[in-house]
Amino acid sequence: MKSTGRPCRLILIRHAESDRNKVKKGATYFADEEARSTLRGIPDYKIGLTDEGARQARMTGEYLRQHFGIPDYFYHSGYTRTIQTLEGILKSYPVDERSEIQVRMNHAIRERDAGYAYDMTKEEAEAHFPYLAEYWKTHGGFFARPPGGESLSDVVQRAYDFVGMIFRDRVDMDVWVVTH
């Protein structure tokens, strides 16, 4: 069989529901102190899955195994929620099949660094960074950086570098990625 010069399959999997996803309900900031209190002070990389997220990961694993078989490589970001999602997926595979899968961590596929406002409520962010609304309008959501954080442009560059590595190093392989 002729080589394609790239992975034969690249599957991207978003981590399952995390504690932070559940509490923030899709918002940029915590709604209030009560919402934040359950997660206050927990670094982003340590945020784990909810019980529902663990169930989602297992169901994803069952689907992937049934429809796509066994990957050659599995990558995750090193964040607890991606590791737990991967572990849930791998539960669908018997031990002998799991032993065939190479698992790697890569920081390039980590969550966007939200910066100093990571643990803030909307009111706190507006009080500490009153210029942000105008800054976002002026620079746009793609290039603007949250204070102390990364722009989406920065994240795209990391992802581009990661995909380049996959295309260079995993030719003709099945590669699955659990990320954010």
Image (spheres, rainbow, N blue to C red):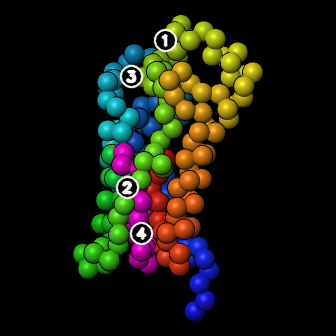
Residue 12 position, x and y percent, is 52, 60
Residue under label 4 = 73
Mark 2 → mark 4, Cα distance in angstroms:
11 Å
Three-letter residue code for mark 4: Tyr
Residue 88 image-quadrant placement = bottom left
Label placed on residue 157: none
Residue under label 1 = 124
Q: Magenta span has 74? A: yes
- Residue 176 makes an appearance in the image: yes
Three-letter residue code for mark 3: Arg
Considering only order in the chain, which callout, 1 or 2, is on the residue closer to the N terminus? 2
Residue at the image point whose x is 37% and y is 55% from the top: 105
Residue at the image point whose x is 42% and y is 31% from the top: 23
Q: How crowded is the residue under tag 1: few (<14 C-alpha within 10 Å), some, or many (20+)?
A: some
Residue at the image point whose x is 61% and y is 45% from the top: 156
Vertical arrangement, residue 102 with respect to residue 121, above or below: below
Three-letter residue code for mark 2: Met
Residue 98 position, x and y percent, is 30, 73
Residue under label 3 = 36
Q: Magenta residues, as a range?
A: 59-79
Residue at the image point whose x is 52% and y is 64% from the top: 166
- Asked whether 99 or 54 is in front, the reply is 99
Mark 4 → mark 1, Cα distance in angstroms:
42 Å
Residue 79 position, x and y percent, is 36, 45
SS under mark 3:
helix
Numbered circles on residues, count: 4
Considering only order in the chain, which callout, 3 or 4, is on the residue closer to the N terminus? 3
Mark 3 → mark 1, Cα distance in angstroms:
12 Å
Residue under label 2 = 105
Viewer-nearest of labels 2 and 3? 2
Considering only order in the chain, which callout, 4 or 2, is on the residue closer to the N terminus? 4
Mark 2 → mark 3, Cα distance in angstroms:
29 Å
